[in-house]
Amino acid sequence: MKKILIIIKREYLSRVKKKSFIIMTVLGPLLMAALFIVPIYLANISDQERKIAVIDETGIFNHKFPSDNKVVFEDIYMSYEAACQKLDELGYDAVLYIPEQVINNPNIVKMTSRKEMGMLIVDKIESVIEQELEAHRLAISGIDKNILKEIKVDVKLNTFTLREGAEERSNSTISYVLGFIGGILIYMFIYLYGNQVMRGVIEEKTSRIVEVIVSSVKPFQLMMGKIIGVALVSITQFILWIALTAFLVIGFQQINPELFKYKKADKTIVENKGLTQNEMESHAENINLENSQTNQILKDISNIQIVNILVVFVLFFLFGYLLYASMFAAIGSIVDNEADTQQFLLPITVPLIIALISLNFVLNNPDGPVAFWLSMIPFTSPIMMVARVPFNPPVALWEVGLSLFFLIVTFLITTWLAAKIYRTGILMYGKKTSVRELFKWLKY
């Protein structure tokens, strides 16, 4: 045991002192924090104001395009060709041309600009044109648009699950996203750190250092020390990523608290030139609806059992990694260079690939038989169980325990078999190893 601890210490310290480890430990949280912060920041900062001239030959769209602090619409009265020629002189970024025939053919509207307009601006213009054309056609047909508005129904399904006789709010979309991200991360971590073990074994074998090491320790001790050492490195890096990401996000939130607040909308939010009181109130109501939906999503996220998810993630990652790392170490011991590993890597990575392919199906039916059995099979359970845990009601505790038990038992058996291969292969040089020969080594 003492020798294994020495090997673990050597593997751990040699890897955490590498520049690559330090760089990835710093870059990882920066990238993850950026995924949270950048979209919020970009959504709140004021872009350069865009001025768009509107030439409306129908008279329907006069003062119908609401301006804000990012886009200003101004109605002008000149020909489309003249406006395009004097675009810079007039101080506009674009000209929106709505011909008279738009009532019968909405697809002839066009916008000309010096630089390409953003997607949000285009969507905003299309939305206004659609609404006004719809209102115009309703008026021609003698249908009151307010009556039609009352008839239209926008359904937002509130989902609940029964837990201990009480209703508990659930959000399948959030659970799906968390499950998908968790499954992908498990796959990436197992493959990434498993490869590190394999490359480390190959390096020691090709440099003949292993010949000196095995004179002092048993091959099994060397293999376990290497596997556990890399496991501790991965856990250290994972904890640092979580801590640093949380620190960056919370720190940015404290520095810029206004960016994380959703303000209520009213008729003064936008510059509503020519809009009626009802139209201004309707616009404000739409913004408030969007904000309330966003706040509900944030509330649903806060109801997620994050601690339970993290505990399951760490346990299944740890033992899933140990299971696959033992096989990666065995592969590293039977080859002389990394190029020869492909024929042996495919069989052990197939279960991981099957789990990834099945991930979408399982997330859409987390309580189905396929999800259950893939969660019980040790070679796929690290991905599948982590993917299922975020859903409400949560996976039964006995399922998690049974799956973890199978995973640990399989890890012990696989490690015992891998050690037999490792013991023989680590001292084999210059010879291609066949699958048949591997089975012979298992009998030694």
Image (cartoon, rainbow, N blue to C red):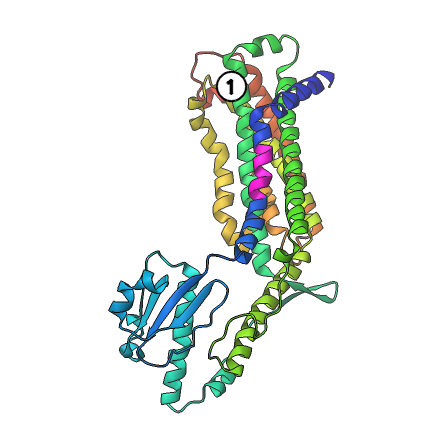
* Residue 167 horizontal side relative to residue 43, left or right: right
Dot 1: few (<14), some (14–19), or many (≥20) neighbours within 10 Å? many
Q: Quadrant of the N terminus?
A: top right
Q: The magenta stretch spans which residues?
A: 24-32
Q: Which residue bears the numbered disc 1? A: 202
Outermost residue on the front side: it is: 89
Q: Could you tell me which residue is drawn at 24 percent across and 68 percent down? A: 81
- Between 329 and 52, the residue placed more toward the observer is 52
* Residue 383 spot, x, y in % from top left: 57, 43
Q: Which SS class for mark 1?
A: helix
| Nearest to the observer: residue 158 or residue 106 | 106
Q: Quadrant of residue 61?
A: bottom left
Left or right, residue 348 beside residue 234: left
Q: Residue at x 66, y 49 (%)?
A: 255
Q: Nearer the viewer, residue 135 or 170?
A: 135
Query: Residue 132: x percent and y percent?
Result: 40, 79
**Left or right placement of residue 299 versus residue 285 in this view:** right
Image quarter (top left, top right, bottom left or bottom right) of the C terminus: top right
Does 10 lie within the magenta span? no
Identity, as a three-letter code, of the amino acid under mark 1: Ile
